[in-house]
Amino acid sequence: MKIYAYLYCDPLLDAAVTEAVWGWEVDRVYCDRGTQTATRPQLSQLLADCALAPPAYLLIRRLEELGDSIAAIGDRLQQLELLSVIVMATQQNFCTGGPAQPSAAVSLMQLLGQIQLYQRSRRIQQGHARNRIKALPPPGKAPYGYRRSRDRYSVDRAAAPVVKDFVDRFLLLGSLRGAVRYLEKKYGKKISVSTGRRWLTSPVYRGSLGYQGNQVVPDTHTAIISREEAAQIDRLLRRNRHLPPRTASAPRSLAGLVTCATCESAMKITRVTQPRREHEYLYLIPTACPQQPKCKAIAYEEILQRTIQTICAELPSAVAAALLPPMEGIKGAIAVQIQQKRSILLQLPSLLESDILDLETADLRAYKLRTEIAELQQKLAQLPPVNLVATVQTVSIAQFWLDLTESERRFYFREFIRQIQIDRCETVWTLRLSFIF
């Protein structure tokens, strides 16, 4: 008993499949790949082979793979039925022949509406895929800061400075909510925090086009956010993800970092003032202390000064003991891979002129190379931008921290410190730092 199988794959939409997709032992597999659905040489060969020596079964995934129209599908099913070949669609409830199965005509009528909807969806997806291959913007309104031109996004000179100022503010303070408030105060532009995060992470503002969530084609239009700024943004957002809500924009540098080791409660900053006096006193107290009596508050300035002393004393030894990967070697390896793919990209026009590649294959290969380059650039951007060993010499000086404002100090504390724990022992307390590396 012979069993044949047939596959049709559109390289624009479908991932490559192998014979193992069937889970059956088949005698021969016919596979067509291409964007032109009418041109299926392997399907023609299958029908010719079935006319000479018909198999008992033909396996397909879906009926739509037999043609690009209901008429074509019905014609090929009729040819196979006349040859007594039982057609089984593994992803649909369809099978021709057999005592327990309805006729092919009845099953086909039941699937007719589904097939039409599926083919219409595929045609729309193919249109989007062709635009994606050509690096054309996706359908819809252009993002704020851009205008839609004929084949790409162009910068909106009125709106782009607003986006740029928002990005600069975030990079300066490391606070998303603070940048959103700044935008409303200066420009009267009200956006939500989620919209602000979308501005910071969208590939469009970085000069690239994003498709299907994770496919990025780089350098398609003028960028508002430079590559270096994008790397800094991603690093700040990853850092803020580990902090309690709203502490990234808090006015005090220790907000969200301090916990009490005795009651294992986070500590918040409270402000105490006296009537008719401008001076204020800042304290750190546990937010949910279960102890009786409760853990006492500690003066904010004392913890700040002790934190600066501890980070200056312990940071150099912590960096020296950390098993840090060789960043220069990793960056060099990624840069070599990017250069190799760019050299292949430059060879495609000559391969096209010599008829080694057709236009469709060359466009598809160029698209895949660009997306792979974008992925490598993303990996490169996620690596630390500076040499930590060299930087620690500067930040281990107490005066460096004392000369910073609270917002600047908050920014740098979060670059090195993951958590500050307060150990209490009767009337005295000690401080422990947990570094991020």
Image (cartoon, rainbow, N blue to C red):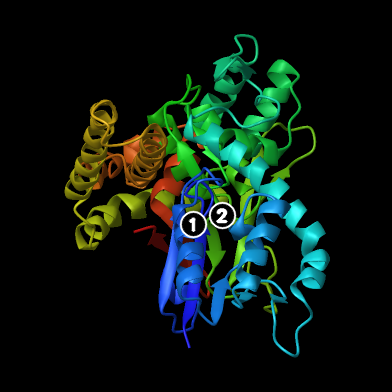
* Amino acid on which disc 1 is placed: Ser
Q: Nearer the viewer, residue 155 or 73?
A: 73
* Amino acid on which disc 2 is placed: Leu
Above-or-below relation of 258 to 56: above
Q: Nearer the viewer, residue 159 or 45?
A: 45
Residue 60 point in image, percent of width and height: 57, 69
| Callout 1: SS | helix
Label 1 – label 2 distance at C-alpha: 62 Å
How many residues crowd around disc 2 within 10 Å: few (fewer than 14), some, or many (20 or more)?
Answer: some
Residue 382 point in image, percent of width and height: 37, 46
The answer to whether residue 243 of the structure is visible from this angle is yes
**Direction from residue 152 to residue 279 in the image, left or right:** right
Residue 291 point in image, percent of width and height: 67, 78
Residue in the picture at 74% in, 57% down: 115
The answer to whether residue 62 of the structure is visible from this angle is no
Above-or-below relation of 266 to 357: below
Residue under circle 2?
A: 243
**Direction from residue 44 to residue 309 in the image, left or right:** left
Check residue 44 in the rendering and tell me which mark sits there, or answer none: 1
**Direction from residue 305 to residue 98 in the image, left or right:** right
Q: Nearer the viewer, residue 260 or 231?
A: 231
Name the quarter where the C terminus is drawn: bottom left
Check residue 255 in the rendering and tell me which mark sits there, or answer none: none
- Whichever of labels 1 and 2 marks the residue nearer the N terminus, that label is 1
Q: Nearer the viewer, residue 370 or 174?
A: 370
Residue 132 point in image, percent of width and height: 52, 35
